Image (spheres, rainbow, N blue to C red):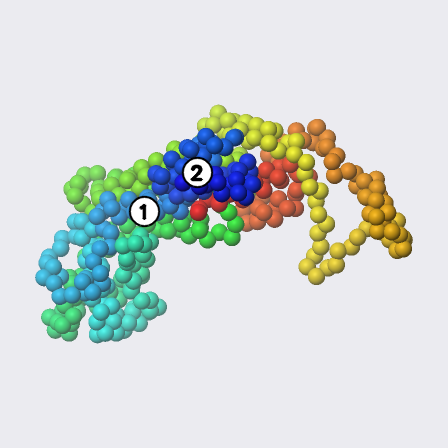
Amino acid sequence: MADVLVKVLNMYGIRESINCITADNATVNDGIFLDLELEMREWSQENGQIRCLAHVLNLAAQTVLKTLRSEAEEPEVDLAADDQRDLLNNNGVDPATILHKLRQILAKIRSSNLLWESLQEDAQRKRLNWLVPILDVRVRWNSTHKMIQRALYLRPALERLLAIDNSRKFSKARVPLPLSHADWKTLESLEKILCLFVDATEFASGSSYTTLSFQLPYYEFLQSSLHELIEREHDRENNQDPDSPGRKIWAAADDAYRKLNQYWVKTDSNTRQVIATILDPRMKLQLFRNLQWEPDWIQNAREKFIRIFNTRYARLPHLPPQPTTLPGEPLVVPPGPIADWPNAQAGETHRNRTRYEVLVFGSREDVLDEDLLESQVDIYLREPRVDRNMDITQWWKLHEHRLPNLALMARDYLAVPATR
């Protein structure tokens, strides 16, 4: 696979232009990039491999469900079928059992017109907007979050429905035993864990532009949020039964934390992600202070940034800023002597225009002043960060005239996707 990839890069003539490669975390990719490192100059797996954020989030969320043994398994028709398990007493000590019971309840409601209509009526009585109950599927972990979230919203209507005597009105539907207050509390805790990964996944996958600069802060945010939840559940369940739902929720959150940390270790030292973060004018070096990095770590990040700039970008010829116009406004060309020579020969006209533009604007080959080259980084880092709602691509377009070489660097690194 590495040979095929190199062949394609050679075919398109971009072998020496590869900055980063974003891929999922399949083991085979590690082998491919190791081989690729041997084939390509100035490219390393350590800094050039970007691990897909959405895939890492998926692995962590799957870890939660696997720890609780609560993945969706049975088809909806099987869950809705009459079964003696429906009538078994459940003390609600296992989150997996609680989720299984919730699936049974929802599957039976979805398969019975009588229960479906009754739930709609109960939702109206409780002044709830009618939202269809959701049943999760195994191949999409976030569907489990949606199932729990929707059930929590419909809880008043579901509790009223399940509280009615099953032996009379709903004898044919055979509704399972209702969820206890402790069961609902367990579902709330599980929803809070999964919600962290749902929000992060939707943000990373739904942004209008690439989000490599958000990888480091999102790892930190998720880890700190899970750590707070773990500490809270640990303090609450410290003196209780090790088989209690809270303890199992705590264990699931801890496993998700460890899974994230496994990829954080591979990410926080990645030069490309550090550079992308600094080049985001909303973050810069302040982001690392917010993440409570050690001062020597921040200094190391700054030195990496300056070293890459000086080595690869400081001496690059930059393109002069192009004239911009408002929408619908015609481009106005500055008047010059050429405008007065309508009958000049085409070749002579081109030469005269070139001489005139060089006289006025300077040669495209002009080298920037040495002090300006060295000060671009200082100017950028010294200035305050911009508003969080600023479109960073538009910001760099507006400021490329005064930070031309740094803008070239931003174009390369901020174009790297955080998800594949």
For marks 1 and 2, give the CA distance.
Answer: 34 Å
Residue under pointer 1: 61
Residue 373, percent from left and from top: 67, 31
For the residue marked with disc 1, what is the amino acid? Answer: Ala
Image point 13% across, 55% down: which residue?
A: 90
Few, some or many C-alpha atoms within 10 Å of disc 1 (few <14, some 14-19, many ≥20)? many
Taking the spot 59% from the left edge, 28% from the top edge, the residue there is 311
Q: Of residues 124 and 145, which is closer to you in this image?
A: 145
Residue 217 lies, with reference to residue 177, above or below; the image says above
Residue 185: x %, y % from top left:
25, 52
Mark 1 or mark 2, whichever is nearer to me? 2
Indicate the quadrant where residue 86 lies: bottom left
**Three-letter code, disc 2:** Asp
Asked whether, in this view, residue 153 is left or right of residue 104, the answer is right
- Direction top: furthest residue: 296
Q: Residues within 10 Å of mark 2 (few under 14, many from 20)?
A: few
- Provide the residue designation for mark 2: 3
Q: Is residue 215 visible?
A: no
Q: Is residue 33 left or right of residue 13?
A: left
Q: Quadrant of residue 329?
A: bottom right
418 over 172 or under it: above or below? above
Task: Say which of 412 and 224 sits in front.
Answer: 412
